[in-house]
Amino acid sequence: MTKIFGYFEPKFSWLALPFAAVFFIFFVIPLFLTIIVSFWDYNDYSIIPDFIFDNYIYIFEGCFRLNTELCMTFKTYISTLYFCFLTWLITLVLGFLLAYFLAFYVTSLPVQIALFLICTIPFWTSNVIRMVSWIPLLGRHGLVNDVLMQLGLIKAPVEWFLYSEFSVILALVHLYTLFMIVPIFNSMMRIDKSIIEGAYDAGANEIQILSNIIIPLCKPGIVIGSIFVITVVMGDFITIGIMGGQQLASIGKVINTEMNYLQLPGAAANAVILLLITIIIIITMTKFIDIRREL
């Protein structure tokens, strides 16, 4: 087998054609059409094929003036990145802890499988059903407020439990934590246990083993889980809309609203910008960590 620039030359395989066809039809073509439509013109009644930059100019109109407050576009993107960062951080901590427990504290394979299935049970239902299930719990007269008032911990119902940033983050974490658990757990199960035993024999404590062995070897799984969570949350609009009571902004909601009003070129332009931001985040993460060994 010949080498090209130090790597083995890949062989052509007919088995790759179906996957390439699916990738081309369901990703490349829609992306190409979205980019094209983002340069079209539109009015209240129709979409006009054209090649203009008005949609992008309109998105950032007034955003680069000095001595003024942030424009609505920047506020919306900052809000989206804020939800994305908090969701990523919380799911990373919870996902790592749960994966660590399953991989190193549960030694029985049947018990591991059973606990893993328990983690996946909520995902057997629709995202909307799982999300809406929080409403009767967190509402003004919901179960959580009732219990806290009966215990005497609060005198009046807590308003920010629902239709707030708290409820949005809670729902997003509930929906997407499993996306972080699976790749991290997979990375942990690939760690050679003899390395950990050797570290114990050398006098290392659990914190040292965690920081010097487990976390470095789990970095590819952490990055893959982060990619899953970030790409989903960046475009989410249903969760933010329902759990935020239609009061919180996100770029996904902007795109959805523009599509509802048939402002497809404007929605396409926002989608292209959102995609570029997401790609930059993903490239930045994969720049420092090689995830190919996990794929």
Image (cartoon, grey):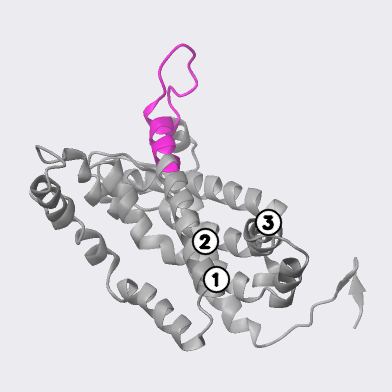
Query: Closer to the observer: label 3 or label 2?
Result: 3
Q: Residue at x 69, y 68 (%)?
A: 292
Residue designated by label 3: 208
Helix or strand or loop: what does disc 3 sit on? helix
Q: In this rendering, would 76 be left or right of 194? A: left
Q: CA distance from mark 3 to mark 2?
A: 16 Å
- Looking at the image, residue 249 lies above or below residue 100: above
Residue designated by label 2: 96
Local crowd at mark 3 within 10 Å, few (<14), some, or many (≥20)? few
- Quarter of the image containing the N terminus? bottom right
| Residue type at the position of mark 3 | Gln
Q: Residue at x 20, y 59 (%)?
A: 132
Q: Which mark is residue 185?
A: 1
Please provide percent x and percent y for residue 224. 58, 63
Of the numbered discs 1 and 2, the one sitting upstream in the chain is: 2
Q: CA distance from mark 1 to mark 2?
A: 8 Å
Segment colored magenta: 59-81
